[in-house]
Image (cartoon, rainbow, N blue to C red):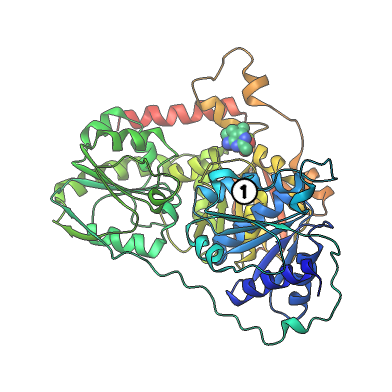
């Protein structure tokens, strides 16, 4: 057997034996040994191949699969610029400890710096963003270390393949492969957090630092403090509309906590961070303290959920939060009209139990944080590692691939940014709701609103019709402009990939609307 075929088969074999079920491949010649080995395995039902022609899309799709299946996912590409197209997803995976296994094909090292075609410095190209790297040549490679390192985040193997790149014997190597899924057992015993405070708040960042909803909920119930959740769709007991409520300095001054426990990172609202800033003591729980966020500040820091030794929260304190939250909820439930706030409120209420929902960065995730009535029954996802507006369609489709029915709420720029994600749709059921405000609406809510050149350098209107673009990919697409149409879309079962464009009033009008909501909150 030739050396390249041998190396590829050894790697594919170990991947399957580790219980990995999906691989995302992009076409190319240098990666032929891997692509053909994976294909032979797929023909025997040992792994599922997802082909994507765009490597940026491929890596984000794989990231979505990692998130929804909880298993590592390999991505395979050829040499050269293809490798660099993985970088955005690798960075996102780095900042969320996601198990992305990057397999890049390369030419033999002796061809580097010689002007050989499609040959560049691929070794350590992702720098500190991966937990393990190896520049591999020869016929075999043990995968124990790279597979184990996936528990902490992305891993990169640069695989040097010399010619011949095609196999010269049969697929007998696939006989008797046995899968035994990797089980990552915690290495440390849980520590204990001892707290005396009776007026504390539990603040839960959108991705919970990767901790699962059930364990966070268990912790929250034991603690019994008011919960401020960036993702109210996963925590039905959270304080309704906390991020809106806390925009009022007066409300914040009444609700100053004795202590705050922060799970994950809070990146969405200044109002929530302002409250955390008022707490004299902050405890932080986030596995990323052990990897990317080693300098994270906290009076005490935990990389896993600790055991609790706490006292009962004061009844007064809980009642105070409830009082403000109820007043705020009344105001939000009374909002009417067709705008980004009412759309978010209706989406949160209207998606049926059992669905998954991906939410894009920028306004969509903040509007759902603020205007959703807390509920359960959904599985929510977002790319909060670096909050990019790139790769969002692909991540959503990767997530949807692991669920029966999914929705994705996405801004128009995020949608256009990753439009090649629509090229391959497999048998995935995902309905995209594109909030089309013709540009970056978030910038009108920030201090740069109205500066000279605002529309050119921040607003960036495109004037395009996302529905027509989706249709040109063969995707079913409609445009809606009323709450009643939205309700129908949310109630209809999701079959295949479809796009619904919610055409909303101007970005300026939206910023004014938000301002008027905050003004009303100031006097509750
Ligand atoms: C890859 C990437 N480029 C640029 C940004 C900066 N950015 C943050 S929000 C935003 C505008 C997003 O517009 P859209 O998706 O339409 O959402 P909207 O603000 O209108 O809600 C931009 C460009 C980013 N987060 N990620
Ligand atoms: Mg927009």
* Location of ligand 2 given as a quarter of the image: top right
Confirm whether residue 364 shows in the render.
yes
Residue 24 appears left or right of 327: right
For residue 397, which quarter of the picture? bottom right
Q: Is residue 485 above or below residue 72?
A: above
The CB of the residue at mark 1 lies under 8 Å from ligand 1: no
| Of residues 74 and 493, the one drawn nearer to the viewer in this rendering | 74
Image quadrant in which the N terminus is located? bottom right
Q: Residue furthest bottom?
A: 176
**In the current view of this chain or complex, which residue is farthest to the front?**
110
Residue 449 % position (x, y): 54, 20
Q: According to the image, label 1 marks what residue?
A: 89
Of residues 370 and 195, the one drawn nearer to the viewer in this rendering: 195
Q: Is residue 234 above or below residue 372?
A: below
In x, y percent, where is residue 255?
Answer: 23, 38
The correct choice, above or below, for 417 with respect to 191 in the image is above
Residue 70 visible in the picture:
no
Quarter-of-image position of residue 155: bottom right
Q: Residue 425: give x, y in percent of width and height.
A: 75, 60
- The local crowd at label 1, few if under 14, some if 14 to 19, many if 20 or more residues have their Cα within 10 Å, is many
Q: Position of residue 396 (x, y in %)?
A: 62, 54
In the image, 416: left or right of 187? right
Quadrant hosting residue 65? bottom right
Choose between 494 and 81: the one closer to the eye. Answer: 81
Q: Left or right: where does residue 214 sit relative to residue 422? A: left
- Note whether 395 is above or below 267 in the view shown: below
Q: Which residue sits at x=70%, y=28%?
A: 461
**Tag 1, which secondary structure?**
helix
Residue at figure coordinates x 33%, y 35% from the top left: 246
In the displayed structure image, the side of residue 474 where residue 211 appears, left or right: left
Image quarter of the C terminus: top left
């Amino acid at each position: 057997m030739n050396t390249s075929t041998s190396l590829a088969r050894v790697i594919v074999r170990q991947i399957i034996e580790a219980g990995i079920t999906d691989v995302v491949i992009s076409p190319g010649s240098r990666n032929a040994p891997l692509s053909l080995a994976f294909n032979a395995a797929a023909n025997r039902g040992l792994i599922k191949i997802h082909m994507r022609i765009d490597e940026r899309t491929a890596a984000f799709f794989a990231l979505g699969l990692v998130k929804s299946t909880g298993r590592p996912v390999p991505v395979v590409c050829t040499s050269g610029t293809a490798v660099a197209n993985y970088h955005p997803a690798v960075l996102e995976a780095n900042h969320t400890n996601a198990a992305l296994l990057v397999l890049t094909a390369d030419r033999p090292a002796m061809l580097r710096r010689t002007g050989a075609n499609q040959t560049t410095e691929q070794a350590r190209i992702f720098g500190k963003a991966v937990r393990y790297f190896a520049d591999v040549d020869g016929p075999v490679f043990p995968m124990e270390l790279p597979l184990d390192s996936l528990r902490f985040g992305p891993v990169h193997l640069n695989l040097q393949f010399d010619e011949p790149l095609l196999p010269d014997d049969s697929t007998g190597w696939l006989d008797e492969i046995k899968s035994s899924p990797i089980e990552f057992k915690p290495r440390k015993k849980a520590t204990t957090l001892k707290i005396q405070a009776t007026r504390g708040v539990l603040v839960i960042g959108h991705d919970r630092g990767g901790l699962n909803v059930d364990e966070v909920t268990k912790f929250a119930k034991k603690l019994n403090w008011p919960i401020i959740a960036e993702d109210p769709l996963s925590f039905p007991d959270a304080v309704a509309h906390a991020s809106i409520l806390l925009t009022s300095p007066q409300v914040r001054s009444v609700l100053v906590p004795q202590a705050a426990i922060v799970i994950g990172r809070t990146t969405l609202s200044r109002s929530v961070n302002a409250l955390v800033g008022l707490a004299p003591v902050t405890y932080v729980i986030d596995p990323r303290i052990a990897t990317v966020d080693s300098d994270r500040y906290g009076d005490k820091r935990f990389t896993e959920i600790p055991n609790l030794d706490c006292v009962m929260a004061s009844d007064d304190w809980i009642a105070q939060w409830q009082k403000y939250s109820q007043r705020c909820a009344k105001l939000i439930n009374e909002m009417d009209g067709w705008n980004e706030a009412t759309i978010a409120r209706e989406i949160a209420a209207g998606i049926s139990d059992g669905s998954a929902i991906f939410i894009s960065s920028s306004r969509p995730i903040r509007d759902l944080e603020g205007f959703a009535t807390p509920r359960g029954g959904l599985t929510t996802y977002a790319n909060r590692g670096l909050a990019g507006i790139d790769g969002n369609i692909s991540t959503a489709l990767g997530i949807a691939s692991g669920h029966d029915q999914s929705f994705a709420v996405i801004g128009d720029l995020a949608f256009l940014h990753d439009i090649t994600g629509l090229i391959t749709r497999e048998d995935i059921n995902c309905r995209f709701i594109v909030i089309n405000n013709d540009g970056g609406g978030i910038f009108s809510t920030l201090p740069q609103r109205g500066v000279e050149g605002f529309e050119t350098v921040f607003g960036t209107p495109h004037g395009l019709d996302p529905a027509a673009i989706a249709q040109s990919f063969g995707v079913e697409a409609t445009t809606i402009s009323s709450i009643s149409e939205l309700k129908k879309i949310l109630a209809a079962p999701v079959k295949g990939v479809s796009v619904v464009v919610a055409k909303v009033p101007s970005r300026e009008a939206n910023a004014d609307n938000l301002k008027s909501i905050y003004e009303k909150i100031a006097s509750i």
